[in-house]
Amino acid sequence: MVEKTLAIIKPNAVRNGVAGKILAMWEEAEFSIRALKRVQLTQVQAAGFYAEHEGKPFFGGLLEFMTSGPVVLVVLEKENAILDNRTIMGATNPDNAAEGTIRKLYADSFTENAVHGSDSPTSAAREVSYFFNVFELTA
């Protein structure tokens, strides 16, 4: 089944100059890049996106990190895009990520782990529509 999923190249990966390498990994894995934009998230945007984590001890640090520099927002599409992207990203903790995965190669730490990816069809639909409108997805 062809799916769309949201991926975010996080501020540390953009700052470290590896966004292009990450995009190339997705393309090499036969994802179609359906939409892409580089943005500087505001506190309000980041808080809305991560609202499910509000009240958790790491919430403030997460918002501070995600607003510390530009991110690259990407809509990826292919058969089984959500699971395939989670596989290519690797484990959240780069110490546990498989060799050759994005997080093994480019994460700086557990909290600055280079990329975000939707974890389910429900979250993918919500996350894609949070950052992209219908006109950006049909181009």
Image (tube, grey):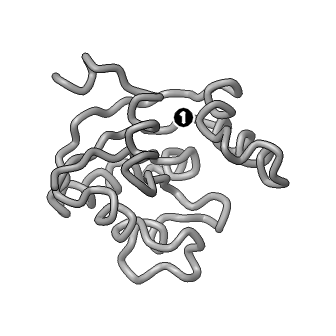
> Considering the numbered disc 1 on the image, is that residue within a helix, a strand or a loop?
loop
Q: Residue furthest front?
A: 122
Residue toward you, 6 or 19: 6
Q: Is residue 38 left or right of residue 136?
A: right
| Number of residues whose C-alpha sits closer than 10 Å to that of mark 1, classed few (under 14), some (14–19) or many (20 or more) | some
Position of 66 with respect to 131 (left or right) is: right
117 over 47 or under it: above or below: below
Residue in the image at 28% along x and 20% along y: 134
Image quarter where the N terminus lies is bottom left
Q: Is residue 118 above or below residue 113?
A: above
Q: Is residue 111 above or below residue 9?
A: below
| Position in image of residue 89 (x %, y %) | 41, 65
Q: Position of residue 23 (x, y in %)?
A: 30, 51
Residue 81 figure quarter = bottom left
Specify the quadrant that holds the C terminus: top left
Where is residue 100 drawn, in percent x and y? 36, 77
**Residue located 81% across and 52% down the image:** 56
Q: In the figure, 117 relative to 95: above or below?
A: above
Residue named by callout 1: 70
Quarter where residue 44 is shown: top right
Going 55% across and 82% down the picture, which residue do you hit?
96
Whole-percent x, y for residue 85 in the image: 33, 61
